[in-house]
Image (cartoon, coloured by chain):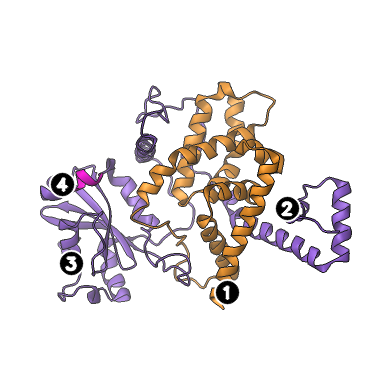
Chain colours: A orange, B purple
Amino acid sequence: MSNSLENDIAALLPRLRRFARSITFHREDADDVVQIAVERALTRSAQWEPGTRLDSWMFRIVKNAWIDEVRARVRRDQLFAPEEEGEHVGDDRAEAQQQRMAIEQALRRLSEEHRMVIGLVLVDGMPYKEAAEVLEIPMGTLTSRLARAREALQALLSDRTRNKE
Amino acid sequence: MSFSDETLMAYADGELEPALAARVEEAMRADPRVEEAVRRHRALRGDVFAAFAGVLDEPVPARLQPVAAPATATEPASKPVSAPVADAGTATVHSLEARRAARQAQAARPAPARPRWGALAASLAVGVLAGALGWQAFDNAGQAPFGRRGGAMVAQGELADALSHRLAAEPAQADAVRLGVSFRDRDGAYCRSFMLGTTGGFACRQGGEWRIPVMAQAEQAQAGAYRQAGSALPAAVLDAIDQRIAGGTLDAPAERAARDRGWPGGK
């Protein structure tokens, strides 16, 4: 195993964590999924072809690690709804903070497919073509799925705005 | 000229080829509705991006760093991370439990740097939180749900009753107690997580009492639009459970069996 692959994976960790945070329901889950993905990647490093995009490959492993964990998570969460971000309890929340929480909450209400596509294109900023590769779907499917996901997200956020008024 | 919403979205994302992008720009100049549609796509993209941008600045936990040997002491390399067995859900439970166990094994694990819940040692928390929450009101019998025995905080009243007798799968009762997971700690004692109003914690059965090592206050959900208030176990409590749990959480039959035997074990 080459050290350079490990270094390259290490360099991707912040992005992988950010993506995982957008598709999971708990912070700890996000890091668990990334950890599982890193271990899987190292175990299967022979499957990665040098010269192809390491990030697409790693994001795909993260996505699959999460999908494999979903049922277990749902079971674990039957008793407690998804964790809130609670680190600012008691603070005066800035508007940006409220906005961030609203978006996280809205994302959790999206379907798995919609969260994935939002996580790749809007959160990570991945081009459509690469996002389609990660999700292993055609470009046309990616585009229409992304449009529907945005619509759903926008609707949830608009509901919130209305409820506040 | 009219463009589909997908095309306007792709324009906002910088995904259109130059010729088509130029036509969209033309349409934006001609039609404020087109311009508004593009603006909304950009705004949503910007908001979502900003919501997660901070993660990049967080220190990456050491446990995520790739290491030459992927196997850890608690998970031999021979064990597949995701075994293709009949019940994939069960397999992944093991995988996650193994992850937790590995996390525990990292004795030198640095404290998480991210901002987090105010975790309060339960022995210090009782006065503060009890006052803040008016816990007495939760107990119809007039007994506070928490008391002290020596230096330890213990459950009493309805909370102790629920911990001793109620199964997690049972429907919610009229009181404010909701039970979560049950597990054995590293001393062999049975422990159960609970929510009481907006306070989450867990209690371990020791010496015939439910001792509470940690509690933290959960946040009230905003505006109630998306979820019920206080239904989530605070992260500080989850962390504390991670530190103490031996093996996995009990499934429903195991929990029932432990209850029926009176939660034996512990020191």
Cα distance, mark 4 to mark 2? 56 Å
Marks 2 and 3 belong to one chain: yes
Nearer-the-camera pick, A144 or B193: A144
Q: What residue type is labelled 3?
A: Glu
Left or right: A46 with respect to B144? right
What crowding class fits label 3: few (fewer than 14 Cα within 10 Å), some (14-19), or many (20 or more)? many
Q: Residue at x 56, y 50 (%)?
A: A115
Sooner in the amino-acid sequence: mark 2 or mark 3: 2
Relative image position of residue B83 (x, y in whole percent): 40, 28
Please say if the residues under marks 4 and 1 sit with CB atoms less than 8 Å apart.
no
Which structural element holds mark 2? Answer: helix
Q: How far apart are marks 4 and 1 (CA)?
A: 48 Å
From the image, tell me which residue sits under label 2: B6
Residue wearing tag 4: B258
Depth check, mark 2 against mark 3: the one in front is 2
* Chain to which mark 1 belongs: A
Q: In this view, does B129 lie to the left or right of A150?
A: left
Q: Give the range drawn in magenta.
A: B251-258
At mark 3, the secondary structure is helix
Using the image, determine if residue B244 lies above or below residue B223.
above
Label 3 to label 4: alpha-carbon separation: 19 Å
Q: Which mark is residue A162?
A: 1
Asked whether the residues under the numbered discs 2 and 3 touch, taking CB atoms below 8 Å apart as contact, a structural biologist would say no
**Residue B257 counted in the magenta span:** yes
Residue type at numbered disc 4? Ala
Which is nearer the N-term, disc 3 or disc 4? 3
Closest to the observer: A164 or B121?
A: A164
Q: Mark 3 points at which residue?
A: B158
Residue furthest to the bottom in view is A165
